[in-house]
Image: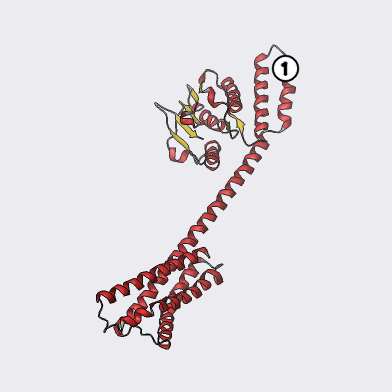
Amino acid sequence: MKALLVATGILLLFSLFYHLTLSYSITTNTVDTEEFFSLDAYYDNAGIQFIVLYLFIILSWILIFVVMNDLNIKIRLATHLLTLPLVVIYSKRGFYWLSEELGYGHLEGGGEIWDIFIPAFFYLVVFTFLHGVEYYFMSKVRLQEKNKFETDSLKYELKAIKAQLNPHFLYNVFNTINASVPKENETTREMIADLSDLFRYQLKASEIDTVNLRDEVEAVKTYLRLEQRRFGERLSINYDIDDDCLHQNIPPMLIQPIIENSIKHGISPKEEGGQVDLIIKKPNGQLEVSIMDTGVGIADLDKALNKGFGLSHTKIRIEKFYNSKLDIKNNQPEGVIVKFKI
């Protein structure tokens, strides 16, 4: 209805412009009034034409935007092929009849072409505007629904994944096993303790929406300690983390999937191994996280974000929750750099 009111304003604006044009034509004698049959008389009743036209446009609007509102847009647009000529013909006839009944003149002969062109022009302007507004709001609603659906789906998916990874009994069992390991097997005890801590953090992360970055970093370090036990000298880790960043809250499990991806697809296939750098800075007050590796690299960076769970899932979370993006590029001389800002 608001769009119709705006369209009405457009029609009134055009009618005022047309009225002023007629006035200018009369006062400056730029139009042969004999050819158009008493332009002075036509000037006096010019407003009648737009009243009649407006009534027919209202009827067309009711048909297309109310009665046919639930039909396919293609059918509704095709309806204009019928309503446009009907509005032009009957608004012209109605205007001429009403003018004659009230004792006013109207265009005759070749001048009648303007009483066909003007209604057709205004009809197209008004309904182009109305359909444009309709399309805009429908697109906006669809986008909001899509975002809500994807966000809800993402939350449920993440919760389900966390629930699968983090049952309570797992770290309790690890602690039990750890207690049964002889003290002389200290390395084994440490690995079990780290694994227990890692699952404890993941369980905590499954129950909250955000975690302190300090806790996230400690969980990542725990994970990397376990990986270093597996890879030995083939895996080198470097941390460059500003302390003033650690108090900020972030979604849980945001960094670890990227590091897992670097080790699995970058370092592991490389015989001599490589290095993973975790860099967290806060330039200009914005948290910036970079994960760099010296692994085998990625041949097709454009497809990298759409393959595998780690990068694609993190990409979606950053986009949905922070309206940011996950950047990926080649490292020099080899490897990959993944960055995001929140």
Q: Position of residue 288 (x, y in %)?
A: 49, 31
Q: Nearer the viewer, residue 64 or 191?
A: 64
Q: Position of residue 278 (x, y in %)?
A: 51, 25
320 shown above or below 337: below
140 shown above or below 165: below
Q: Nearer the viewer, residue 129 or 213?
A: 129
Does residue 82 appear anywhere in the picture?
no
Rendered residue at 52%/66% (across/down): 72
**Mark 1, residue position:** 181
141 shown above or below 86: above
Q: Position of residue 63 (x, y in %)?
A: 52, 73
Q: Position of residue 275 (x, y in %)?
A: 48, 23
Q: How many marks?
A: 1
Relative horizontal placement of residue 147, taking residue 56 as reference (left or right):
right
Does residue 209 appear anywhere in the picture?
yes
Among the 4 quarters of the image, the one containing residue 189? top right
Rendered residue at 36%/74% (across/down): 118
Indicate the amino acid at tag 1: Val
Q: Nearer the viewer, residue 67 or 195?
A: 67
Work out which residue is located at the far front of the displayed protein and give it.
Answer: 27
Label 1 neighbour load within 10 Å: few <14, some 14-19, many 20+: few
Label 1 secondary element: loop
Q: Nearer the viewer, residue 126 or 222?
A: 126
Work out which residue is located at the far top of the displayed protein and give it.
Answer: 184
Rendered residue at 36%/69% (across/down): 17
Coloration of the structure image = secondary structure
Among the 4 quarters of the image, the one containing residue 171? top right
Rendered residue at 52%/28% (across/down): 263
